[in-house]
């Protein structure tokens, strides 16, 4: 699997394009793919960033944490529900959440959902 470009290399590609080089020339000069040079420059133009976005780990737990009370109350009211049924119940309340996100939520909070 290819690795990401270093912050320095990303910046040099953007600076070269800003200085007048074409994206193709910058890609060739710094030995990166044309697609990569285009993406780096587009990210710079749109968002003003040359650094990489965060990779890996959970990027969305804050969405379920913001609705923690609703998730807990729904689970406590009907503990017999399977995760996919709980997800459907939460969708009726306007919370769109996946089964795996619910599973991670319960694990983070130390809540076990054993059927007795």
Image (cartoon, rainbow, N blue to C red):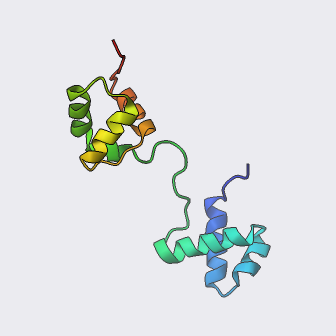
Percent position (x, y) of residue 106?
Answer: 36, 29
> Which image quadrant for residue 105?
top left
The answer to whether residue 64 is above or below residue 105 is below
**In this rendering, is residue 113 above or below 87?**
above
Q: Quadrant of the C terminus?
A: top left
How many numbered marks have been drawn onto this rendered protein structure?
0
Horizontal relation, residue 74 to residue 41: left or right: left
Q: Front-most of 55 and 20?
A: 55
Q: Position of residue 99 (x, y in %)?
A: 42, 37
- Compared with residue 49, is residue 60 higher up or lower down, i.e. above or below? above
Q: Residue furthest top?
A: 116
- Residue at 69 percent of width and 70 percent of height: 35
Q: Quadrant of residue 61?
A: top left
Closer to the camera, 64 or 98? 98
Farthest residue, direction bottom:
20
Q: Nearer the viewer, residue 25 or 65?
A: 65
* Residue drawn at x 70%, y 52% as measured from the top left: 3
Residue 112 vertical position relative to residue 50 in the rendered view, above or below = above
Task: Please name the residue shown 78% across and 68% down the image.
Answer: 31
Residue drawn at 63 percent across, 63 percent down: 8
Quarter assignment of residue 114: top left
Considering depth in this image, is 91 or 67 the residue closer to the camera? 91
In x, y percent, where is residue 17?
Answer: 65, 81
């Amino acid at each position: 699997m290819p690795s990401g470009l270093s912050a320095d290399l990303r910046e040099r590609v953007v600076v070269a394009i800003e200085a007048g080089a074409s994206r193709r020339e910058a890609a060739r000069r710094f030995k990166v793919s044309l697609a990569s040079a285009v993406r780096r420059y587009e990210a710079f133009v749109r968002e003003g960033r040359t650094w990489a976005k965060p990779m890996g780990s959970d990027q969305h737990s804050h969405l379920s944490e913001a609705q923690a009370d609703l998730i807990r109350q729904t689970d406590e009211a009907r503990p017999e529900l399977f995760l996919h049924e709980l997800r459907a119940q939460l969708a009726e309340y306007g919370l769109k959440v996946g089964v795996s996100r619910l599973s991670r939520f319960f694990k983070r909070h130390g809540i076990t959902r054993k059927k007795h």
